[in-house]
Image (cartoon, rainbow, N blue to C red):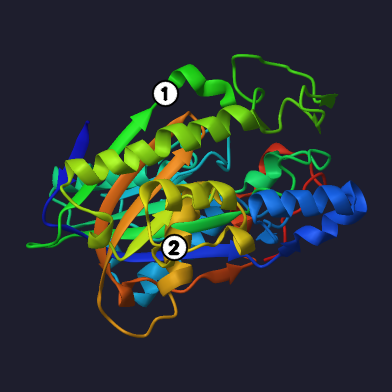
Amino acid sequence: MPDFRFENISVSGISAAVPSLRVDVDSFKAHFGDEAVEKFKSATGIHSFHKALDGQTASDLGFAAAEHLLTEKKIDRGEIGILVFVTQSPDYGRPNTAGVLQKRLSLSQDCACFEVNLGCSGFIYGLEMACAMLNASSSGKALLVLGETATKVTHPNDRSTAMLYGDSGAAALLEKCPGATEIICDLKSDGDRFDAIIVPAGGFRHPGMTRDSYIGKDGNERTLYDVCMDGTAVFTFTISDIPPAIKDFLAATQTTVEDYDCFSMHQANLFILKQLVKRVKIPPEKMPITIDRYGNTGAMSVPLTLCDRYGSDAEAGAVKVLACGFGIGLSWGTASFTIDRKDILPITCTDSRYNDGIINKIFPDGDTDKEEQ
C-alpha cells in the first residue's frame, strides 16, 4: 500500500462556496415525468443542487472559497508559496487557470502555481501534492483550491446526469506547524477503466467531433461533449474497491473507526454512502450527508461536507477526519488529518464572475459583451 505521510504540517482552514442558483430536482418533472424523477431521487438521494450561472466558472467558485478563507483567517498572502488548483472545468484551453487565481487572490510572484486535472478524488490528491511541495520547500503556507462546473457538461435530456451534479468550489489552507498531527494520504488509480466516466470530445484524440446529439446505449440523449457514465461499471467500482481501500487504510495506519470523529466521503449517491456505512461499519452519525442538498459535487464533496457539518459550530475543538474521494479516472484516495472546528468555515453562496477574464479582444467589436458582476 503506497502511502504518503507528512509531519509538522496542519490543515489550518477549510472553506466552500456554491452558486446562489439552487435547482430543485422536482422541477425536472415537467421534462422527464413524475415517475422518472421520483425514481432518480429514491436511487440517488438528491433533492436539489446548486448550478453555476451563465459566465460563472469553476475558478469563480474556487476563488470565492479561497478569498473567504484567507480573509477570515487574516492570512498574509505574501506567505503563501504554493497554489494547487484542482479542476476539470478550466477557464481556457490554455493557459492553466492557477495563474488567474494567483492574480485574483493577490498572491506573490514567488508563489508556485499549477493546475491538476482530477475529479472526485481531487481533494485527496491535491492535499498530498500541496503537502509534498510544502514539505520540500522553504515556504510556510500552501493553498489548495478546487472548483467544478460539471453541470456545463451534462445534456439536458440525459436523465442519468442532468439531475446528478452540483457546482461548487472549495479551499484548504496548509501550514507548517511543529508538532502537528500527522497527515496521511493513500492514492490509487486504474487506467484500465478510464472510459467508465468520460467526456469523449474537447481534446486532441478526436479533433473536430460533431456536436450533434445521439442516443446512447443506455437510452439517454447526449453529445460527445457531454459526460457519459457507465453506471453499472461505476457502481461496481465503488462497491468493490472503496470499502477495502478504507479498511486497508485503517489497517496501515493502525487505527479503527472509533479513532475518527468524522468520515467525510465523496457524495456519489445515497445508496453508495449507505453501503460504505454498512461494509466499513461506520456509525451513521459519523458520516455526514450533503448529496441531498448539493448533489454530486465531485472533488469538493469532502471539504463541502465538512463545512456543512462544522461550519456553523462556534465551539473550538479538534476533529479527526478520515476522508475518501473516488470516481473518474478511475481514481481514488483516502486521507486522515486533524483540524480545529473553528477553522472550518460555513458554506457561502456567490454570484461572482470574473469580468476581466473575458477576452474581448479576440472577438469583433460587439460580438461579446462582458457579463455584469
Q: What amino acid type should be assigned to the residue bearing mark 2? A: Pro
**Which numbered tag is attached to residue 218?**
none
Name the residue rendered at 62%, 29% in the picture. Answer: 232
Instruction: State which quarter of the image contains the C terminus.
Output: bottom right
Q: Position of residue 309 (x, y in %)?
A: 44, 71
Quadrant of the drawing holding the N terminus:
top left
From what the image shows, is residue 365 above or below residue 214? below
Residue 190: image tag: 1
- Circle 1 sits in a helix, a strand or a loop, which is it? loop
56 in relation to 235, above or below: below
Q: Residue furthest bottom?
A: 314
Q: Which mark is residue 284?
A: 2
Q: CA distance from mark 2 to mark 1?
A: 29 Å
Q: Residues within 10 Å of mark 1 (few under 14, many from 20)?
A: few
| Between discs 2 and 1, the one toward the N terminus | 1
- In percent of the image, x 58 and y 43: which residue is there? 91
Residue type indicated by callout 1: Asp
